[in-house]
Image: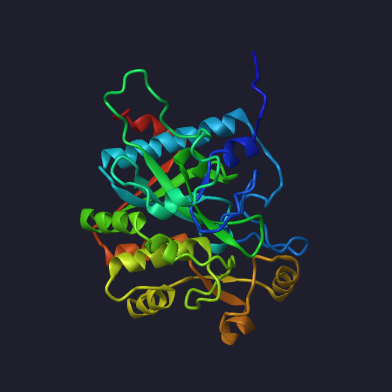
């Protein structure tokens, strides 16, 4: 039996991503730190999904599972005729915090959405020539054409205090050192999908991005931002475009609509260690009462899920897992 050698994670990720913020920095050729709410220990207070700028390898089985889940996700979105949706992955085991999902992104149908001017102008230099890991190979017969999707999401850059917005194929989204091959899919009602598509085409996605990254960003302060917070604030703009024009008005809207953030508990020793040794963790903007109690409010995937269900009750919610779910999905065009 021939065993395939592991592939370089750097090759499969870095050459296939296009940076869409107006910064000049590229996503490093290694694993990146997506938002991960944390595994705490005294020796290493904060462990994140992926290890910032530490080269890694992808085993063939891991690659195949990531691509299988990506194709399953694509088929499910296509069967639902979804133009846009919110998807979330399981980056690490957060069960001790009552959480399952660590990181969300906004998925959009590329067949119906043209990238914005910012998206094409500020793409990384090799984005037009480098092949992107995607879930559908080019076919010798052009018809029928598969419905394709990409993901737009915020990523922390190398464990620093900075972030960027990235667009990538579904395959890449599930290759960031995930804990479990499972995806949460939230498909808004059709009118809201159309509004979200408009936001992705225009300047709104970039306007709601704030590059000062903090894994534990306080949901009602504009000093920092984490990955899930960007997604929630963009969704807020879609919900009330006449009132929500920037991050401050988005957070005011969330408070008025009764958004309830997630809450995690962090002991003092871990907090001190993180403050000293991690550039992407800060506690300073949290209210003093929370800091004294060691309980911190953050934007979690679960809180975004609950808020969407509250604001858009007709939102479709699905959870796909491997390997059992893959047998229940038949190929679609």
Residue ID at (48%, 33%): 67
Image coordinates for residue 12, horizontal then vertical, percent: 58, 36
Image coordinates for residue 255, horizontal then vertical, percent: 38, 79
Quadrant in the picture for residue 288: bottom right
Image coordinates for residue 155, horizontal then vertical, percent: 55, 55
Residue 288 sits above or below residue 250 on the image: below
Quadrant, the N terminus: top right
Q: Nearer the viewer, residue 212 or 82?
A: 212
- Residue 74 as seen in the image, left or right of residue 58: left
- Residue 295 as seen in the image, left or right of residue 197: right
Residue 294 sits above or below residue 181 on the image: below
Residue ID at (58%, 38%): 15
Quadrant, the C terminus: top left
Residue ID at (50%, 76%): 222
State whether residue 88 appears in this view: no
Image coordinates for residue 290, horizontal then vertical, percent: 57, 81
- Residue 99 as seen in the image, left or right of residue 10: left
Residue ID at (47%, 54%): 153
State whether residue 124 appears in this view: yes
Q: Nearer the viewer, residue 287 or 26?
A: 26
Outermost residue, top side = 1
Q: Nearer the viewer, residue 168 or 82?
A: 168
Quadrant in the picture for residue 146: top left
Residue 106 sits above or below residue 291 on the image: above
Residue 291 sits above or below residue 193 on the image: below
How is the protein colored in the picture?
Answer: rainbow
Outermost residue, bottom side = 288
């Amino acid at each position: 039996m021939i065993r395939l050698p592991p592939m370089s994670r750097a090759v499969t990720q870095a050459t296939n991503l296009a940076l869409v913020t107006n910064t000049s920095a590229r996503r490093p050729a290694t694993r990146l730190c997506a938002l991960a709410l944390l595994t705490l220990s005294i020796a290493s207070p904060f462990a994140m999904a992926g290890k910032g700028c530490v080269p890694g390898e992808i085993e063939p089985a891991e690659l195949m599972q990531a691509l299988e889940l990506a194709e399953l996700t694509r088929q499910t979105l296509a069967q639902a005729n979804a133009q846009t949706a919110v998807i979330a992955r399981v980056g690490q085991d957060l069960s001790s915090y009552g959480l399952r999902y660590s990181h969300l992104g906004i998925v959009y149908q590329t067949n119906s959405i043209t990238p914005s001017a910012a998206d094409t102008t500020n793409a990384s230099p090799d984005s037009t020539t480098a092949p992107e890991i995607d879930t559908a190979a080019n076919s010798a017969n052009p018809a029928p054409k598969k419905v394709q999707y990409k993901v737009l999401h915020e990523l922390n850059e190398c464990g620093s205090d900075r972030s960027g917005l990235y667009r990538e194929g579904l395959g890449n989204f599930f290759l960031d050192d995930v804990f479990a091959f499972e995806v949460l899919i939230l498909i808004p009602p059709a009118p809201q999908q159309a509004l979200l598509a408009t936001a992705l085409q225009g300047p709104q996605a970039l306007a709601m991005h704030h590059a000062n990254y903090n894994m534990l960003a306080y949901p009602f302060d504009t000093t920092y931002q984490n990955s899930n917070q960007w997604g929630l604030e963009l969704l807020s703009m879609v919900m009330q475009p006449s009132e929500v024009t920037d991050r401050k008005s988005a957070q005011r809207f969330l408070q008025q609509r009764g958004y309830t953030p997630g809450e995690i508990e962090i002991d003092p020793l871990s907090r001190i260690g993180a403050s000293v040794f991690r550039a992407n963790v800060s506690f300073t903007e949290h209210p003093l009462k929370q800091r004294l109690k060691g309980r911190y409010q953050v934007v979690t995937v679960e809180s975004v899920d609950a808020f969407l269900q509250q604001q858009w009750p007709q939102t479709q919610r699905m959870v796909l897992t491997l390997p059992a779910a893959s047998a229940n999905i038949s190929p679609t065009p």
